[in-house]
């Protein structure tokens, strides 16, 4: 891999150091160890360097001396982080009641190994800060200042700016259509929008059509094909093509548009006269403008052009090509065309046509190799064209095999990564950091959005003083909108990177990021700080390997199944600087985990371990402990000493039945996915009282163990407004259930509520009377509320989208609210009713819900007395499932012919005959009959094109 293009990103790390130096923990350390002035000097030097980093991050692309300084700065900054985290650990240890013996100890154990015993004494701390950090940083600062002064002088003398110059050739409207394949449907779709009649509110504006896609996908080519189409030429009175590129300057662009329209240079340098001349030139004329390769995301840039187009005639159009969906959204397009990759066959035809110009004929043996090469192009026409350029001059099979077996994306003379380089270099620094981090994952890796955000947060790439995941989600979406991610075709909840994008990430990441592949040479070095591995087995195979001793991040991807029961790390001895540790599915966690005092994040999801070492509670810096789906049965008793812990994820830990006492002392805790209430003297629900920062989802289970209902009230859920999702679960019945539920009243900001296995006869006041005040509720589920006969007035919740009622055996009637049907269920989208044996009727407003699109009813044998209109008012209902024991309702719908008119899918478990109303459902596409449906019918009894499935 060519490493000269690596991008040194150090501003985030420097900012973290400055923030650490202002923390209370380091102030305490400075006072106790008499190094406050040295820490203050260190902070000043780092702040001075911060002022130079804006220059340096741009200059490094052209100035190798600046890049060398940044590389040295990064090394020192990592060292400084290690030292400061050591100090912070010691300061926090001073406050740990387990270790307080007198005022403080004279010596502490450090990892710096400055003497033979590995003990750092008080008198050694000052030289450590001065020599290891301040002296080196001052030297770097001076070198950066020299380069900055030289650069500033050049800029003043020659008028040079520090912007990245786009040296790519500018596009024009002319295209050689003989080499264009696979875009006919795209052309037709855009033509349809171009030639369509404008809507009433668009008659006096130029409507925008955006073509969005990855670099190298063919956006410009598609725009050229449309621009030169004969029907388009006839339709528009005037046409103009302008390549915008990275320099979005309204004066330059309007001048270029005028020159394209009139074939003369307007020779005007001010915006006002240019706008007036363009307005006069296009007034009342049907106009087509192509703005190719737009990058700006600033509303003001676009506004200067938009007002100039207002004089254009009815039906005028603007085509914009861009890699960023944010650009298209800024322009409020009438239509956005997401350009997709080509098929392998289409890419091969492009290659074959280009190669045939020189070779005349591609032999079958070459074609076989060529088709394998095409698979590496991953559907990008640019890649296919450029690979064809490598092959067109040779008919030697060995040469083609050489190209096939090489990493063509990494060839030094290949421009493939350069096709996307501008996409990267125009990213804000915080997005660059997040993107480059993805290089530790292999090609074709399927990203889970939330997991990746958690890692970004653990690496401190994402900083937010508001809600935990909001900013991380924004960062991910920004990268998605810029085409750095795309949704996986097989699993829409996962995201992938195109190979070309992944190659770009590797190119700019340098040696700080690496991967450790199974039974392959390690793609890492002594400079590597962030590393992924396929499994523990090969990572710990060579105990003499010291390349990894400075690792900050170690992620086990579990991409193979070699992680057997006896393949686990016996010790973390050489990995003492880890901040992030993700070990998927391990069977054992070494006892020396407590020595990894810098750890911020531990993820042991799907771990087979039943108990964590007690030494884990010595990790004062630990912020996240993820144990999802693990076999954990018990948490360490010293959890209360994890003073920095913010996120404890124990969801789906089915064997964990209690929490350790004192968990309520973790005042920084934000995520607590599950809280099992302990019996007797265990951790009671009152421990929740002081956890004011809890946010996101909280599941409180084993509520039958609450002895005193006052303890439930003392949990004070009412004053925890950041909890979005609340699950309240009992594992058995008790005579205090109603009072306990009454005491667990949540804040009115709640968005999701699930009550499970509740044995009370009725719901408390906050559900029966005060529920309408919970106007943020989106999802509401009552499951296994065995004795309740009445439901709360859920129809009055304005944002409720999902409603689920399961196993409510005593529920007879779901009554309507007294406020009238026009105010009920305004936003309900999905409804599930299951195993409600006595339920006889649904409220009429529910059956007029304007947005209900999915409804499932199962095992409700008495539910048949529907209102006269049946389901005919559910005009938005697309999917209806009528399951077990629903023969009565099916018969009623058959007799009254009151089915939803716009239904797309109907599933019926049992029926004796074909429903009469089916023939009238023109939109029905899928009809499923269950195993108890023994019916005969002919195709004429059904709508055309319906797909029938039996015995699902």
Image (cartoon, rainbow, N blue to C red):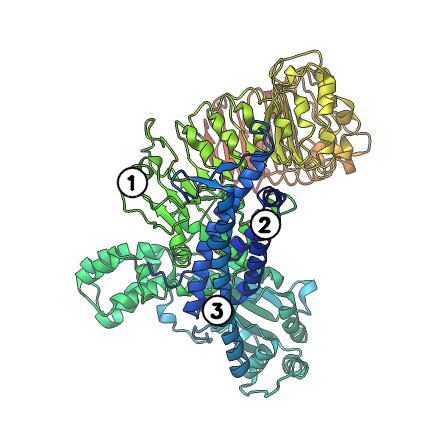
Expressed as whole percent of the image width and height from the top left, the position of residue 465 reads 65, 46
Give the CA separation, mark 1 to mark 2: 35 Å
Q: Are marks 1 and 3 in contact (CB under 8 Å)?
A: no
Numbered disc 1: secondary structure = loop
Which residue is most to the right? 819
Crowdedness of circle 1 by 10 Å Cα count: few (<14), some, many (20+)?
A: few
Corner quadrant of residue 804 = top right
Where residue 544 is drawn, which disc sits there? 1
Residue 248, compared with residue 410, is above or below; it is: below
Q: Are marks 1 and 2 in contact (CB under 8 Å)?
A: no
Name the residue that disc number 3 marks: 59
Mark 3 or mark 2: name the one nearer the start of the chain.
2
- Image vertical order of residue 832 relative to residue 155, above or below: above
Residue 596, x across and y down, in percent: 46, 37
- Direction from residue 650 to residue 848 in the image, left or right: right
Mark 1 or 3, which is nearer the eye? 1
Query: Where in the figure is residue 154, as x and y percent of width and height?
Result: 50, 79
The answer, for residue 790, to whether it is visible in the render is no
């Amino acid at each position: 891999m060519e490493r000269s293009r690596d991008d040194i990103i150090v501003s985030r790390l420097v900012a973290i150091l400055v923030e650490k130096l202002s923390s209370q923990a380091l102030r305490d350390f400075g006072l106790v160890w008499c190094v406050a002035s040295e820490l203050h000097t260190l902070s000043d030097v780092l702040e001075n360097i911060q002022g130079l980093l804006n220059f340096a991050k741009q200059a490094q692309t052209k100035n190798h001396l600046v890049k060398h300084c940044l590389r040295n700065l990064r090394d020192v900054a990592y060292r400084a982080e290690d030292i400061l985290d050591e100090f912070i650990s010691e300061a926090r240890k001073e406050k740990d009641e387990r270790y307080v013996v007198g005022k403080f100890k004279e010596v502490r154990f450090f990892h710096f190994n400055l003497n033979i015993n590995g003990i750092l004494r008080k008198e050694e701390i000052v030289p450590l800060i001065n020599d290891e950090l301040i002296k080196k940083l001052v030297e770097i600062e001076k070198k950066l200042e020299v380069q900055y002064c030289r650069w500033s002088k050049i800029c003043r003398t020659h008028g040079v700016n520090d912007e990245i110059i786009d040296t790519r050739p500018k596009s024009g409207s002319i295209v050689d259509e003989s080499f264009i394949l696979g875009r006919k449907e795209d052309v037709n779709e855009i033509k349809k929008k171009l030639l369509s009649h404008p809507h009433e509110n668009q008659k006096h504006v130029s409507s925008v059509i955006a073509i969005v896609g990855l670099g190298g996908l063919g956006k410009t080519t598609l725009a050229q094909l449309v621009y030169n189409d004969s029907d388009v030429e006839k339709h528009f009175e005037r046409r103009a093509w302008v390549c915008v590129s990275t320099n979005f300057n309204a004066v330059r662009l309007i001048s270029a548009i005028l020159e394209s329209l009139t074939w003369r240079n307007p020779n005007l340098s001010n915006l006002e006269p240019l706008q007036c001349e363009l307005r006069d030139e296009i007034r009342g004329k049907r106009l087509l403008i192509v703005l190719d390769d737009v990058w700006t995301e600033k509303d003001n840039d676009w506004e200067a052009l938009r007002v100039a187009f207002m004089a254009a005639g009815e039906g005028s159009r603007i085509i914009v090509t861009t890699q960023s969906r944010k650009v298209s959204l800024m322009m409020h397009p009438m239509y956005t065309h997401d350009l997709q990759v080509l098929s392998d066959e289409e890419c091969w035809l492009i290659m074959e046509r280009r190669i045939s110009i020189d070779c005349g004929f591609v032999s079958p043996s070459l074609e076989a190799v060529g088709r394998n090469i095409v698979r590496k192009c991953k559907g990008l026409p640019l890649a296919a064209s450029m690979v064809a350029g490598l092959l067109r001059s040779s008919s030697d099979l060995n040469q083609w095999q050489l190209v096939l077996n090489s990493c063509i994306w990494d060839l030094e003379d290949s421009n493939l990564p350069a096709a996307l380089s501008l996409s990267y270099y125009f990213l804000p620094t915080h997005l660059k950091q997040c993107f480059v981090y993805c290089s530790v994952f292999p090609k074709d890796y399927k990203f889970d959005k939330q997991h990746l955000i958690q890692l970004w947060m653990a690496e401190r790439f994402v900083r937010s003083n508001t809600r935990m995941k909001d900013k991380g989600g924004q960062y991910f979406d920004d990268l998605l909108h810029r085409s750095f991610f795309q949704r996986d075709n097989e699993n829409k909840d996962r995201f992938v990177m195109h190979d070309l994008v992944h190659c770009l990430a590797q190119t700019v990441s340098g040696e700080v990021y690496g991967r450790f592949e199974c039974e392959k040479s390690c793609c890492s070095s002594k400079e590597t700080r962030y590393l992924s591995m396929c499994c523990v087995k090969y990572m710990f195979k060579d105990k003499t390997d010291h390349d990894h001793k400075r690792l900050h991040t170690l992620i086990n991807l579990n991409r193979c199944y070699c992680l057997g029961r006896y393949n686990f790390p016996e010790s973390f001895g050489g990995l003492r600087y880890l901040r992030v540790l993700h070990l998927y599915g391990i069977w054992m966690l070494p006892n020396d985990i407590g020595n990894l005092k810098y750890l911020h994040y531990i993820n042991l999801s799907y771990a087979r371990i039943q108990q964590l070492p007690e030494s884990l509670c010595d990790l004062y810096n630990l912020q996240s402990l993820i144990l999802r789906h693990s076999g954990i049965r018990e948490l360490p008793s010293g959890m209360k000493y994890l003073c920095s812990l913010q996120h404890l994820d124990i969801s789906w830990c089915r064997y964990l039945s209690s929490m350790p006492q004192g968990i309520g002392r973790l005042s920084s805790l934000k995520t607590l996915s599950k809280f099992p209430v302990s019996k007797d003297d265990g951790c009671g629900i009152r421990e929740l009282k002081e956890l004011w920062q809890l946010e996101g989802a909280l599941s409180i289970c084993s509520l039958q163990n609450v002895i005193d209902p006052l303890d439930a009230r003392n949990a004070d859920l009412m004053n925890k407004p950041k909890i979005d999702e609340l699950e309240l679960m009992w594992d058995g019945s008790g005579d205090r259930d109603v009072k306990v539920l009454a005491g667990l009243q949540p804040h009115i900001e709640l968005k999701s509520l699930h009550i499970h296995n509740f044995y009370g006869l009725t719901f408390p006041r906050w559900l029966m009377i005060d529920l309408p005040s919970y106007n943020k509720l989106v999802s509401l589920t009552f499951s296994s509320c065995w004795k309740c006969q009445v439901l709360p007035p859920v129809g009055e919740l304005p944002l409720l989208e999902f409603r689920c009622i399961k196993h409510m055996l005593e529920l007879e009637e779901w009554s309507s609210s007294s406020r009238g049907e026009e105010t009920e269920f305004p936003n309900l989208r999905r409804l599930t009713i299951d195993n409600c044996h006595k339920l006889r009727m649904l409220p009429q407003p529910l059956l007029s819900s304007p947005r209900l699109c999915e409804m499932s009813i199962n095992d409700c044998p008495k539910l048949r007395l529907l209102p006269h209109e049946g389901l005919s008012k559910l005009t938005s209902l697309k999917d209806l499932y009528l399951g077990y024991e629903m023969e009565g309702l099916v018969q009623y719908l058959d007799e009254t012919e009151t089915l939803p008119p716009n239904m797309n899918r109907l599933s019926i478990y049992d029926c004796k005959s074909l429903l009469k109303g089916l023939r009238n459902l023109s939109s029905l596409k899928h009809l499923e009959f269950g195993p108890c449906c023994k019916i005969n019918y002919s195709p004429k009894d059904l709508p055309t094109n319906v797909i029938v499935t039996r015995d699902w």
